[in-house]
Image (cartoon, grey):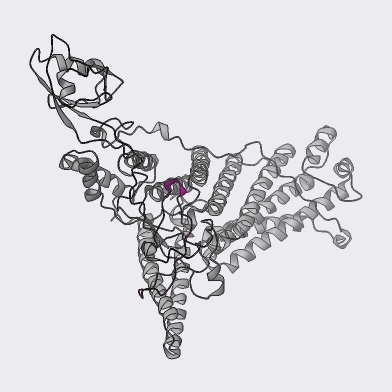
Amino acid sequence: GCNPLAETGRSKLQNQRAVLNQQILRAVRMRAGAENLLRATTNNKVREQVLLELSFVNSDLQILKEELEGLNISVEVYQNTEETFTIPLVPLGLKETKEVDFTLPLKDFILEHYSEDSSEYEDEIADLMDLRQACRTPSRDEAGIEMLISYFLQLGYVENRFFPPTRHMGVLFTWYDSFTGVPVCQQNLLLEKASILFNIGALYTQIGTRCNRQTKAGLENAVDAFQRAAGVLSYLKETFTHTPSYDMSPAMLNVLVKLMLAQAQECVFEQIGLPGIRNEFFTLVKMTQEVAKVGEVYMLVNTAMNQEPVKENIPYSWSKLAQIKSDHYKALAHYFIATILCDHELQSGDDEDQQEKALSQLYDYVPEGLMLLTVLKDKVQRKQLGKAHLRRAIIYHEEALRVCGLCKKLRNIDVLQEVLTAAHKRSLLKYAQQETEDDFLSLIQAPDIIPKTEHKIETIAPQFSKVKVKDFFHRLGPLTVFSAKQRWTAPRTILIRHEEGELGFSLKGGSPVQIYCLDPFCSAASMGLKEGDYLVSVGGVDCKWLGVNEVLERLRSGGEQPVEIEVISCQDTAASMHSKSATYSVGMQKTYSLICLAMEEDKTDQTKKAPLKLPFLSWGTKNRQKAASTLCLPSAVAGSSQIKKKLSPFTLLNSESSLY
């Protein structure tokens, strides 16, 4: 990973994000304590003081949330360093996490489950922790993407090796929400894997915004990066459907995918216009539809951003920027068609039918009383329709400038103001050139333009298979057998004696090999060898990865001398184990309910009827009735509140969670 102490603009933003996350966590804990006290006390004076304190804490949280939004709209830091005259693109900030120490849990599990000397695996555990630490500061290039994917794939091995489905390892993973700063903690790897996927998508967006949009190669790379970002986020939405974090909820991910595809479409339009837009009839028709398509996709993004529940958590400035871009590109579409009508009068050598056909593709309907062929031939009608499009272009430009002026964060982005102002002035100048004294007679309303693109933008699914990863804990044996799901006896030592050149058994299978066709009267059977045992060692040499021929060769290499082997026997994996998990999270107003089960549930009255279970992504009903937050820590007073049972966020684990 990158040097976490490097004083780059991006690292400064991430450091500020980490500090804000800690401040939000402290403020939410204070609020949780105040809420518990408010519920526990009956003293009116104390209640008044607590309510006053709650109002102060909620105000602080709102300020901190606005500061975090400011970091999310600091788009200029992520743009290309070359001076460009283009509207900035929006990147996603990386999710922050706390350090995790795998050492003790994994060493204990290796000793207990695999019956091996855990001290021999200290280097592998250190490599895993180093890789995780490096993933907190990935470089903004393909190497950074590859490193994150490597860790994601490595987590698959770690999950199968050390995380059985019937219990938890005691490793607590903490990740902070990218938009609200609210921490979420869980004891399973699903949150870890989902967060790494989110950061892969976020890093692709940062790579896309960094590309030089003044070159063809730069724009192609930007389009590819945003398509890949959308693909990763879409994969995250489909694979991890119950992540207890706002930024990874299905609704939020759906909006982010639309935003990334819209930015890819914007780069496609810039790519088409990069050599320059020729003032020619059919070229302008094509550009009109392309830019109208950009305006349409941004309009859909803005609509999605203003829907519940996304509206509460998406940065306000992002929503306004999507609205501004929609208006800006719609204005450009009307400006291009106005240029077609005002600057290109039908000449004797022009193909009337071709021009009429091209123009008809732009309109869903034509204003009453007008025919396109007549408009092309009639200079007055042509000019009137062109001016009508210019008026709509000016209206859209003025709306974009107005919205930009109302948003404090966007007002401070100089290049955005410059691009909008220049486009507005160009439309005004064009309109002034067409102005005549009889303007009041022109009552034509310019029709809407049909968006169309020849460059379809789709998500690019993540290709994890291209990154080759070796299992850090390869020495434990083939994963098909030596996994956390399987249980077996401790290794047993058997002394093999050659009886008339025969072993008394055969071997079968791949690696590790199994005992097959065991003679029940041979010496090995009398020493405890069983049919179906796995052979893991021959003469003190590990043979978990060896095939039948290699093991037989080792067994016979000693001649007639006895050979010591070690074998293991599979056990029934249905043994019941403690299945409680601990999930800790704190939230802000109108947050998703975190599905948690108290560790004290065994102490509750078993005779009471269990409440109905609710789906994970449901809004807390109690939060709508209270001005304070939805989530608070349970009161320290025994029996002060009854904790409700709900579904686990990760139903795949079939385990319950606990809210500290």
Tell whether 130 sits left or right of 208. left
**Quadrant of image for the C terminus:** bottom left
Which residue lies most toward the right here?
369
Return the residue nearer the eye: 641 or 388. Answer: 641
Confirm whether residue 461 shows in the render: yes
Q: Is residue 540 magenta?
A: no
Q: Position of residue 307 (x, y in %)?
A: 62, 59
**In this rendering, is residue 301 above or below 588?**
above
Residue 161 occupies quadrant: top left
Residue 531 occupies quadrant: top left
**In this rendering, is residue 289 above or below 311?**
above
Q: Is residue 659 magenta?
A: yes
Which residue lies most toward the left here?
561
**In this rendering, is residue 177 above or below 358?**
below
Which residue lies most toward the bottom here?
45
Tell whether 175 sits left or right of 335. left
The residue that appears at 45% across and 84% down in the rendered structure is: 52
Return the residue nearer the eye: 114 or 584. Answer: 114
Q: How many marks?
A: 0
Confirm whether residue 2 shows in the render: no
| Most common secondary structure along the magenta stretch | loop
Return the residue nearer the eye: 254 or 496. Answer: 496
Q: Position of residue 131 (x, y in %)?
A: 29, 44
Tell whether 99 sits left or right of 185. left
The residue that appears at 69% across and 47% down in the rendered structure is: 292
Tell whether 649 sits left or right of 362. left
Q: Position of residue 41 (x, y in %)?
A: 42, 83
Please give the range of residues in magenta: 633-660
Residue 117 occupies quadrant: top left
Q: Position of residue 426 (x, y in %)?
A: 67, 55
